[in-house]
Image (tube, rainbow, N blue to C red):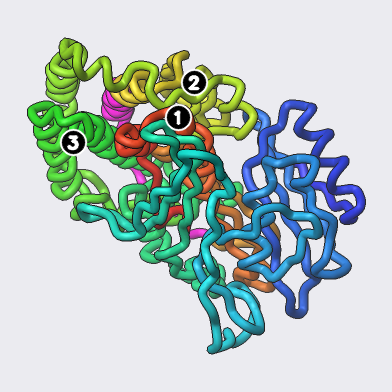
Amino acid sequence: MIESREICINELQSSLKECIEDGYGVVCMYATEKGDMPRTIQTVLRKEDSIMHITTDLISDDYLSISMDQPIFRSYEREMQEMNGLNPIGLKNHGPQRIMWRYKDGYALQKGELPEERYAVPLRDNGVSGEGVFEIPVGPVHAGVIEPGHFRFSVAGEPIIKVRAHLGYVHRNVERLMETSASKDNVRLIERVSGDSAVANALAYAHAMEGDSEIPYRAKLLRVIFAELERISCHFGDICGIAQDTGFIVPAVTGAALKEKVLRLNEIIGGHRFLMGTVVPGGVRWDISESNLDAIKKRILKIDFDLEDLMKMLDDATLFADRIETTGILTYENAVKFRALGPVARAAGIKTDVRKEMPYDAYGDLGLKLITASNGDVCSRLHVKANEIRESVSLINQCLDKIENGPLRVRIEPKDGFGIGLVEASRGELMHAVNIVNGNIWRYKIRDPSFVNWSVLERVLPNNIVPDFPLINKSFNLSYSGNDL
């Protein structure tokens, strides 16, 4: 259920405070651009299955910063400042949020031609000083095949005092590329927002464009199967990475092999290791044959046993436990304060999951057990993801029991107005929102869970030691490209 409000800028601060006090959590805040349409700020909030959509008309690009009283909006205001050319008066921390450069006369999401001249934004130090305190710069180029991100650690010896993440090195201006005819199939672009979340992004895009269209039931079940296979492969990768960053090679290799088996299954049933090209607005592009449904059953049956052996290797190792227990603790209070998402939030005791709170596709017909832990450390995040693999296996089996013959896709006619897609990706709540005007996409907004959880990670790292950064970072496993767009 979506409740829409239109308010003036002077009422925005009080309206947001009222919504948050009423139990709504911030999903996203973004701006629409200039042109023939009025300039607005769009705010999306959620409380379980209720969505609040607030539209605020702007008189000018200057307005009093909301984050001065409500810091949770700081990242969104920084983004609107650099991507939309807004000027939140009083905004603290003017460092890069999504993009490492600026246009000299203009901004990244402006309508019309982009200016040619641009300049790099200088990175700031952490502002921490004192005897024995120094900074360690890490990145943006890292060992291994990962995307670029720059981290600055303020340390006194090995203990971390403060960390600031500087991202935006892989900005592609995806949201601007989405400004096409609403009837155009943009799935191929959307799937590449973050490659290991191709299904989740395609689902969110499809839901935003579908509105209240009725999707065939077989397609709904297939969508759940694709989404849960994606979740399993991502979580196996995370478990493998945590083992590797503690130097525990045998379980690391075992986890990587289990992930590879899921990716090979994906290629068999969907023609792509990351299941790209499977989900489209209106349903799914490809069916799964009876023989391939049997292949899924056989592989899924084995996953529980394989996972049990892998986790036993990890849980029986006391040195491994020493590294992951009480490391990188996210308290319940901070998880609520900064609205942590996904397994990161659930490992800190927050009972949240879009699949459970506002079921989409076939999730409302399935028995979904919400997996949580309470300690909020690397160990809790590891076990939440392991148990979520087991739950994904259960969901896939339920879909296989319910599947029946039927159509795969219906024709979608996108309507003018506001549309939103909210799904539970492997990293947490993923939002796609669209504003359609005269049959064209005027503004397309993507808020990946990593955009939120990068800020949470910065607050988790202090009071840990520098050698534990890779381990904590891997337990979050955030997406650079999902943040930078």
Q: Residues within 10 Å of mark 1 (few under 14, many from 20)?
A: many
Q: Position of residue 283 (x, y in %)?
A: 41, 50
The amino acid type of the residue labelled 1 equals Val
The residue pinned by badge 2 equals 348
Which residue is at 27% across, 25% downward? 393
Assign the N terminus to one quadrant of the image. Answer: top right
Residue 449 visible in rendering = no
Q: Position of residue 254 (x, y in %)?
A: 10, 30
Query: Is 17 rendered above or below residue 117?
Result: above
Name the outermost residue toward the front.
131
- Distance CA(mark 3)–CA(mark 2): 36 Å
Name the side, left or right, on which 204 lies relative to 3: left
Chain-order first, disc 3 or disc 2: 3
Chain-order first, disc 3 or disc 1: 3
Mark 2 residue element: loop
The amino acid type of the residue labelled 2 equals Ala
Q: Is 282 or 122 nearer to us in this picture?
A: 122
Residue range (magenta): 388-412
The residue pinned by badge 1 equals 344
- Distance CA(mark 2)–CA(mark 1): 7 Å
